[in-house]
Amino acid sequence: MQTLGRRDESDEPGALILACHERIRGFVAAAARLASDAPASDADVAATAAAVARYFRVALPLHEADEDRSIAPRLAGVGGEVAETLAAIAREHAELAAPIAALIAIADQLADRPGERAHARRALEETVATLAAIFARHLGREEAVMIPAIAALPAAAKAAIRDEMRARRT
């Protein structure tokens, strides 16, 4: 699993969130490849499925905690579009729960039994399509509103967010 604060990443919380967004997009794309009919060996299917399940089971909840426990409280008093965005983000986190659980279940199945890929394809396609649509809206909203709001926070607040994000991953 990639960690926050790698040497090639900024220490700014907004940049760390953007890096998480790229990983989310990457793992949704990996799940879409599993759902495709592109040829892949059982070993590749199993490895990709295990990585997808691990990401959505372990890393994504950390990202949500970053937003819910570190960022949202510090932006709560900003109001206006930021307040509307924070409320939408919270709703979307709840909306994501069921399709993420479904994706993890399918990915776990394929990690253990990659030969069942064809049988899982339809459910995986539907689940990935749902996730892709929600994440497109969700990540776009965060990038347009939340990231600039984070950038406007005082340096001490940004440092606290960064430190909390890192602490979750140790």
Image: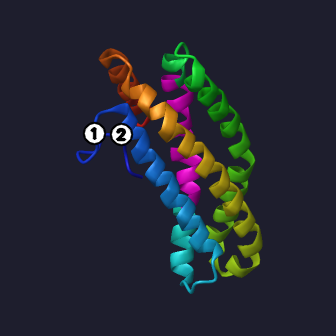
Query: Is 66 colored magenta in this rendering?
Result: yes
What residue is shown at x 51% (from left), y 52% (from top)? 24
**Image-quadrant location for residue 151:** top left
Residue drawn 59% across the image and 20% down it: 80
Residue 97 located within the stretch drawn in magenta: no
Instruction: Name the chief secondary structure element in magenta.
Output: helix
Q: Nearer the viewer, residue 16 or 112?
A: 16
State the residue in front, 77 or 114: 77
Q: Earlier in the sequence, mark 1 or mark 2?
A: 1
Q: Is residue 143 left or right of residue 134?
A: left
Which residue lies at the image location 40% right of the left edge and 47% below the top edge?
19
Q: Which residues are magenta?
A: 52-71
Figure quadrant of residue 158? top left
User: What x and y, as percent, mark residue 167?
Assistant: 40, 29
- Give me the residue at 36% from left, 26% from top: 163
Q: Is residue 53 left or right of residue 109?
A: left
Q: Position of residue 143 (x, y in %)?
A: 48, 40
The front one of 105 and 20 is 20
User: Image quadrant for the C terminus?
Assistant: top left
List the single residue furthest toward the left.
7
Q: CA distance from mark 1 to mark 2?
A: 6 Å
Q: Secondary structure at mark 1?
A: loop
The three-letter code of the residue at mark 2 reads Ala
Q: Is there a contact, CB below 8 Å, between mark 1 and mark 2? A: yes
**Residue 51 left/right relative to 104:** left
Q: Amino acid at mark 1?
A: Ser
> What residue would you read off at disc 1?
10
Secondary structure beneath label 2? helix
Left or right: residue 125 versus residue 78 is: right
Count the marks.
2
User: Which residue does the numbered mark 2 point to in the structure image?
Assistant: 15
